[in-house]
Image (cartoon, grey):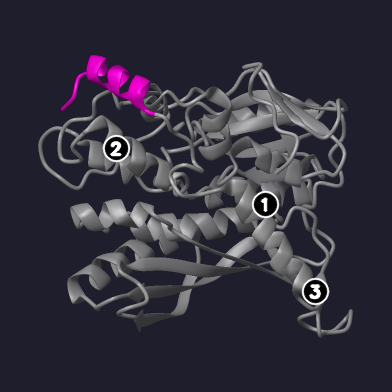
């Protein structure tokens, strides 16, 4: 492994700044492309009141459609280039968790209870052992999320895909009058940050680029102290913990505890008062800028962020990535944020911290413009 001195010399010789765009993923361009696609799509072909009619939902963490007295919620996402590290190590035991989590966590953001899931695997050539490992991982994840795996599809696409790709779609439901839209968010509401288990499933193009810079070996011990009280690391090898195990640590599935808060807020029973939960934000691609999806006018200030996990700081130091880029690309140790009334935030944070150590109040809603500000002065986001 190269020394830190060598890395510094390497960085000084580099003419290209190391950021997410330079690793091949341009978040702003991706946002423009998605907006262009959405603008070119026709609206709902179902009339209001009919099953399947589209329900307007700010934030777009999931899509809502009418279904009698209830609403159905849909979310779809994939694992992304984290799969390339799984392929390199031939370790698929946590990949199903990643796929499941990326979808069911989004459903929570609209107040939906996840109930079913379907997966899609595209591969240049089927491999029974790999498919079996992914199937076991999906099954374990389904049990954690409380969902039924209702089907799936495997496509062999030689010449189109070079490595295995995994994505999925989750279905959820909620009463018709109970979506969480963010419209009840008011100045003075508090933000509860729930820790992540690692990189989750975002930013891996940049992670892999930094791995090249560092010369770090996936099967070697991490070049940092990886143990942290906010998370456990899923092991797939004997002996000392490896860097590969840290990087493949599965995305945390938040369904059980967060759903209980959703149901308490809906009913007014249990530990959480009625209607006190005003917004839920899954911190994925775009990092903290995801908060801007919750309300069109209000802003957020994070003055006491969740503790940053050590792998983020190692990656940042190796490639000399600035703080804002880190918070724009990665979750930085915070996987989900709840926006709640200030009078019950302490109780909610206390309840969640028993399940997710490190959960705490990290900030508040501000009427300072539509932006996210942070304890670090360089971390400011004014658009998602």
- Mark toward the start of the polypeptide (3 vs 2): 3
| Dominant SS type (magenta) | helix
How far apart marks 3 and 2 lie (CA) works out to: 43 Å
**Residue beneath disc 2:** 211
Q: Is residue 10 magenta?
A: yes
Pick the quarter of the image with the N terminus: top left
Say which of 88 and 17 sits in front: 17
Q: Residues within 10 Å of mark 2 (few under 14, many from 20)?
A: some
Instruction: Give the magenta range.
Output: 1-14
Q: Position of residue 354 (x, y in %)?
A: 50, 31
Residue 109 badge: 1
Please name the residue shown 84% across and 39% down the image.
185
Q: Position of residue 101 (x, y in %)?
A: 48, 55
**Residue beneath disc 3:** 54
Q: Is residue 119 magenta?
A: no
Please name the residue shown 80% across and 46% down the image.
182
Circle nearer the viewer, 3 or 2: 2
């Amino acid at each position: 492994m190269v020394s830190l001195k060598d890395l510094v010399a390497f960085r000084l010789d580099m003419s290209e700044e190391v950021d997410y765009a330079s690793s091949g993923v341009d978040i702003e361009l991706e946002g423009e492309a998605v907006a262009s696609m959405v603008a070119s799509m026709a609206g709902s072909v179902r009339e209001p009141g009919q099953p399947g009619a589209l329900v307007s939902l700010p934030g777009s963490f999931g899509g809502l459609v009418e279904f009698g007295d209830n609403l159905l919620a849909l979310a779809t996402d994939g694992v992304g280039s984290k799969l390339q590290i799984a392929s390199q190590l031939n370790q698929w035991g946590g990949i199903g968790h990643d796929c499941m989590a990326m979808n069911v966590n989004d459903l929570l953001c609209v107040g939906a209870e996840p109930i079913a899931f379907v997966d899609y695997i595209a591969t240049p050539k089927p491999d029974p052992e790999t498919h079996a490992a992914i199937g076991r991982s999906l099954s374990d994840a389904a049990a954690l999320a409380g969902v039924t795996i209702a089907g799936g599809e495997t496509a062999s696409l030689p010449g189109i895909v070079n490595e295995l790709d995994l994505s999925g779609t989750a279905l959820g439901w909620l009463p018709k009058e109970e979506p969480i839209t963010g419209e009840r968010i008011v100045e003075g509401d508090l933000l509860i940050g729930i820790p992540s288990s690692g990189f989750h499933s975002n930013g891996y193009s940049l992670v892999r680029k930094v791995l090249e810079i560092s010369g770090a070996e996936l099967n070697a011990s991490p070049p940092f102290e990886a143990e942290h009280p906010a998370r456990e690391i899923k092991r797939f090898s004997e002996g000392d913990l490896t860097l590969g195990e840290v990087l493949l640590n599965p995305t945390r599935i938040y369904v059980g505890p967060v759903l209980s808060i959703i149901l308490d807020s809906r009913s007014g029973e249990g530990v959480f008062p009625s209607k006190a939960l005003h917004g839920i934000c899954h911190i994925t691609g775009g990092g903290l800028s995801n908060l801007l999806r919750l309300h069109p006018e209000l802003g957020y200030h994070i003055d006491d962020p969740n503790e940053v996990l050590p792998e983020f700081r190692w990656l940042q130091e190796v490639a000399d990535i600035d703080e804002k880029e880190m918070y724009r690309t990665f979750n930085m140790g915070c996987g989900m944020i709840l926006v709640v009334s200030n009078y019950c935030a302490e109780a909610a944070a206390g309840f969640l911290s028993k399940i997710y150590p490190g959960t705490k109040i990290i900030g508040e809603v501000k009427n300072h413009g539509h932006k996210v500000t942070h304890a670090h002065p360089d971390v400011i986001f004014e658009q998602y």
